[in-house]
Amino acid sequence: MISLIDAHKKFINDLKKKSRAEATTVAYSKDIIQLISFLDKEKIKNTNEVKLDDLNKFMQSLADEGLKNKTISRKTNSTRTFFKYLRAENLVDINPSQNLEHPEVKSHDPRILSKLEYRSLRDAVRKDIRTAAIVELFLQTGIRIGELARLNLTEVKLNGGKGEIYISEFGSHEARVVPLNDAAEEAISEYILIRPTNVKSENFFITKTGKPLLVRNIRATLNRYFEKAELSHVKVNDLRHTFIAHHLTQGTNLLTISKIAGHKRISTTEKYLNFIKNPGAEKIELEEL
């Protein structure tokens, strides 16, 4: 048995050793700190003192504060992951979160941009060469925002519309190779021409001063352009949804899209069939997005 504070430190260090995404690690850390703060008010300071009833009280306190079920569900997941780790490390005798239930969360359909919408976005970013390349990579490859931020110079191979990018293994996501079509290569080539050369950073996308372009930088920039393009309720990940949905609509093989998108299970890709019309009705190549 150790203090909850020390347990938290060990948990976060373990996440870092496993190369979990920085945003994920920060989110877990904040959630567990909030839990520890609540338990401290309940005079609970050590790992073995925590009971299921205490965790349920914590979740109820979040609901009483007006937090949405989706947020509470995330904190439930953080709590369960925390205590699962503690049990695996023999830092608790019994996992009190084993029967902790998630609140009911209504799933929302993915936001899929129409041709008119993603063309409006392209028009909005046209004069911003770096952002135009980022948008085109999202639309043409379905790459995740974290993967794009970590992309290295050596992982981008151009070859006249038959190039590829190598997505390295990170966290629970396996490495994969993603093909580049003409549209993606053209946008990338234009960015390479203006990318600062007198810098040491090996990151593919960098700032004007040569620093890596972080996830928060990418998200903030695209949010501005979503507004400029008058696109409502659009998030960066919706560009990934758009890539998947449009190519399934166009008849691209389900397994092919699943592998390119880096889905662990093909069932994840299959879910998109519920949100598109006439899947496979028209067979065209990837570069036609």
Image: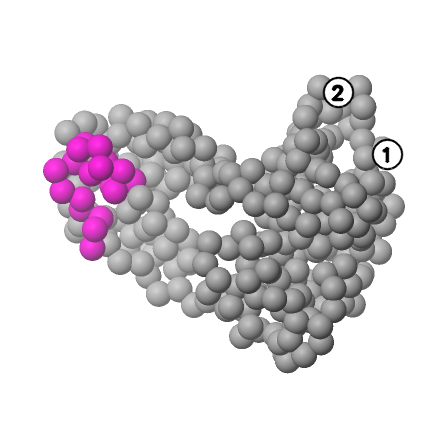
Reading the image, the residue beneath label 2 is: 199
Q: Position of residue 113 (x, y in %)?
A: 69, 65
Write down the quadrant of residue 38 in the picture.
top left
Dominant secondary structure (helix, strand or loop) of the stretch shown in magenta: loop
Q: Earlier in the sequence, mark 2 or mark 1?
A: 1
Write down the quadrant of residue 30 in the picture.
top left
Q: Position of residue 46 (x, y in %)?
A: 18, 32
Q: Position of residue 241 (x, y in %)?
A: 61, 60
Does the stretch in magenta take in 95? yes
Does the stretch in magenta take in 236? no
Numbered label attached to residue 30: none
Q: Position of residue 49 (x, y in %)?
A: 14, 37
The residue located at (70%, 55%) in the rendering is 139
The residue located at (19%, 32%) in the rendering is 91
* 109 or 134: nearer the viewer: 134
Q: Secondary structure at mark 2?
A: loop
The residue located at (70%, 38%) in the rendering is 156
Q: Mark 1 Cα within 10 Å, few/some/many (few <14, many 20+)?
A: few
Q: Mark 2 Cα within 10 Å, few/some/many (few <14, many 20+)?
A: few
Write down the quadrant of residue 89 in the picture.
top left
Q: In the drawing, does residue 20 fall left or right of residue 215?
A: left
Q: Secondary structure at mark 1?
A: helix
Q: How many marks?
A: 2
Numbered label attached to residue 193: 1
The span shown in magenta is 82-99
Q: In the drawing, does residue 133 fall left or right of residue 67?
A: right
Q: Give me the C-alpha separation between circle 2 and circle 1.
A: 14 Å
